[in-house]
Image: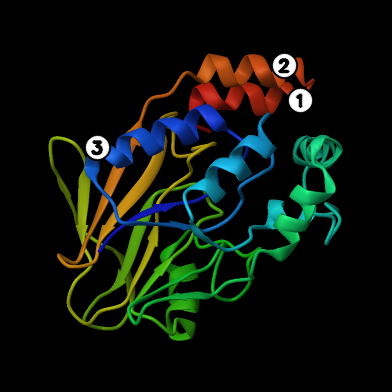
Amino acid sequence: MRYFVLSDIHSNIEAFQSCIERAKQAGYDAVLCCGDIVGYGPNPKEAIDLLRSLNARTIRGNHDRVAAGIDEPDQFNAHARKAVYWTRSVLSDEYREYLTSLPLGPMDIGTEAQLVHGAVTHEDHYIFTQADADENFPLAGKRITFFGHSHFPVVFTLDSARRSVNAPAYEFDEYTAVRCDGKSKFFVNPGSVGQPRDGDPRASFVIWDEEHGRAEFYRVEYPVEVTQAKMRDADLPPYLIERLSLGR
């Protein structure tokens, strides 16, 4: 099986569509989503509709939870709060019910893998560092854990002393690959479709080749200016608009 693994779409339909087209070229059999379909961007309904059309196995993210009204955005910064309230204003009950129905991770994917949004410890927690990964590895019930929330593409694994390290990556013409075979555990973040924050504004996703034990990282250009124009029309915060060009 080849899985198209994505996270943090954040209502960016242009980035999402571009990722799907590239994933079709790479080839995949099923779709997995680590949450945050909505928030920040200008097309929450369209993002939900497109994800559902892919029959993706999906868990909720913190923005999905808050946009659905399950929780209030008290811990969000002012820019994110404004985007949440705008998202709520354009979502009908049907869309809110869909977000409410999304399961909380971890979600098992066969015998090998699971999905979480932020961390195994909690969906709002981040795995940024090796120390964060060290805290979560003992809690991982599967060999491979796909996670999102940080918007940084990364793979953590364990060294011979059972300490977290960044897994080695190999450059190919069309993607960067990380070996995820053997018996070691891995934490794999596919990066963000709709709002990358690693300094590269291109949309990010992973193809997990289960048979060959390989995570293939892809970066995709999309018409950022189209998304930004929509955000301006919706009066979304300038900070959220500008950061798309910077990948921050």
Which corner quadrant holds the N terminus? bottom left
Q: Nearer the viewer, residue 129 or 219?
A: 219
Q: Seen in the image, is 87 located left or right of residue 166?
A: right
* Residue annotated with mark 1: 236
Query: From where the camera sits, is residue 65 visible?
Result: no
**Spot occupied by residue 167 in the image (x, y as percentages of width and height):** 25, 62
Q: Do the residues labelled 2 and 3 touch (CB within 8 Å)?
A: no
Q: Residue at x 75, y 40 (%)?
A: 80
Marked residue nearer the N-terminal end (2 or 3):
3
| 3D distance between C-alphas at marks 1 and 3 | 33 Å
Marked residue nearer the N-terminal end (1 or 3):
3
Q: Which mark is residue 232?
A: 2
Label 3 crowding class (10 Å Cα cut-off): few <14, some 14-19, many 20+? few
Question: Number of marks in the image?
Answer: 3
Looking at the rendered structure, the kind of residue marked 1 is Leu
Above or below, 23 against 28 in this view is: above
Looking at the rendered structure, the kind of residue marked 3 is Gln
Q: Which residue is drawn at 76% across and 25% down?
A: 236
Q: Nearer the viewer, mark 2 or mark 3?
A: 3
Q: Residue at x 70, y 53 (%)?
A: 64
Q: Is mark 3 on a helix, strand or loop?
A: helix
Quarter of the view holding residue 11? top right
